[in-house]
Image (cartoon, rainbow, N blue to C red):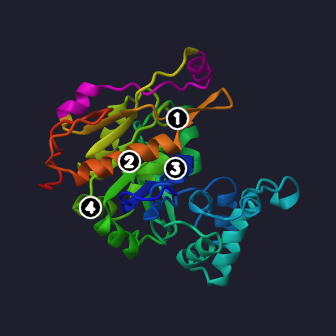
Amino acid sequence: MKTGGFKPKVVAIGGGTGLSTMLRGLKEYTPNITAVVTVADDGGGSGQLRDELKMLPPGDIRNCILALSETEPIMEKLIRYRFDAGSLKGQSFGNLFLAAMNGMYGGDFVAAVKSVSDVLKVTGTVLPVTDCDTELVATLADGREVVGESNIGKAIIDFNSRISRVRLRAKNGGKIRLLPDIREKLAEADIITIGPGSLYTSILSTLAADDLADAISAADAPTVYINNIMTQHGETDGYTAFDHAAAITAHTCVDFIDYCIVNSKRIDTPILKNYAEEESAEVILDEERFKNRGTKLIKRNIAALIDDKYIRHNPTALAEAIMDIANIERRRGVNISEEGVVLYEPNRKKNRG
């Protein structure tokens, strides 16, 4: 971890590989991190354990724990290990570790996550957004309802219909309780981040927990949305940068996005051709629409090329952008001009003086 300087309290909301990637960079700047993670996953190894052991899905939680851990390399390899044969083929040891701990605590998944975090020497805190057993329900533009996170992408493609809305539904029919610790962390935060990750199945599936959007809006901390670099076939085909942010506002019915981090460097043509074969494209920045909304843009080169083929978020660049925002907010009221920062009028949502 970098020594000295401001160590902001960060609440990071989301799921999937996007959130864990960002956390790896952020932990180098501050130990005061709370990851609030989706529990909508119902596919793969997580889905299997969810069905067989009646527990919350461990996969996204496992990735965030690993991202924030300070464990030995051999332990990290062990947690990442996937069995390649037998009835456990494809299953992650880390998932089984969380499942075993969940069993030891009598099905108290939150306690299990805390204990695994302690064992792996996690910097900060990892929390599931709720301890309720839920399922993600998507309503498509043609009126169909699709149940289950793992079914949504395929249904969009099969029926050639966009997502109109997603919501979480408690399997017992009750309220989807937001963990009290999350409310407390949001109230104490210096900065709140959302994303990066799959817009509907990672981000909005987390924000759909009861009262989370209102708790974010009530917090004094600025809220930062980290935009995706590429569109996702089956979820965000044709979406611009503003479309991503607007979908969050439309779903939550609260305008809480103060800053939006977007990629500033165009992706090389050969890489774009690879993505075009998978019906994915670069997310276009429609800057004027952000300006009209009053959202402040942070334009940075946040893209990293993996294996000369895939575009991912650069964890260090993301962390630096988030820290810059945290420092801008500390100096609020001072006439400043930051490189890569377009300072528009403050968002209407939060009056921070």
State the residue position of label 4.
214
Residue in front for this viewpoint, 132 or 326:
326
* Residue annotated with mark 1: 234
Q: Which residue is nearer to you in this view: 89 or 80?
A: 80
Nearest the eye: 185 or 332: 332
Q: Earlier in the sequence, mark 1 or mark 3?
A: 3
Amino acid under disc 2: Ile
Q: Residue at x 52, y 44 (%)?
A: 315
Q: Are marks 1 and 3 in contact (CB under 8 Å)?
A: no
Q: Residue at x 69, y 64 (%)?
A: 95
x and y percentages locating residue 258 in the rendered image: 25, 46
Disc 3 to disc 4, C-alpha distance: 28 Å
Tell whether 187 sits left or right of 316: left
For label 3, the residue is 25
Q: Please give the residue where the numbered disc 2 appears in the rendered image.
A: 322
Where residue 149 sits in the image (x, y, percent)? Answer: 54, 51
At 16% across and 44% down in the image, what residue appears?
A: 346
Please say whether residue 223 is visible from this viewpoint: no
Element type at marker 1? loop
Query: Which is more N-terminal, label 4 or label 2?
Result: 4
In-image side of 191 versus 167 (left or right): left
Q: Amino acid at mark 1?
A: Gly
Mark 3 / mark 2, whichever is N-terminal = 3
Mark 2 vs mark 1, foreground winner is 2
Marks 3 and 2, Cα distance to the nearest angstrom?
A: 10 Å
Q: Kindly give the residue lying farthest to the front in the view shown.
A: 4
Q: Give the vertical position of 329 relative to 164 (above or below).
A: below
Give the quarter of the image for residue 298: top left
> Where residue 165 sits in the image (x, y, percent)?
38, 46
Residue at the location (59% across, 24% down)? 275
Look at the magenta stretch and give its main secondary structure.
Answer: helix
The part of the chain drawn in magenta is 270-292
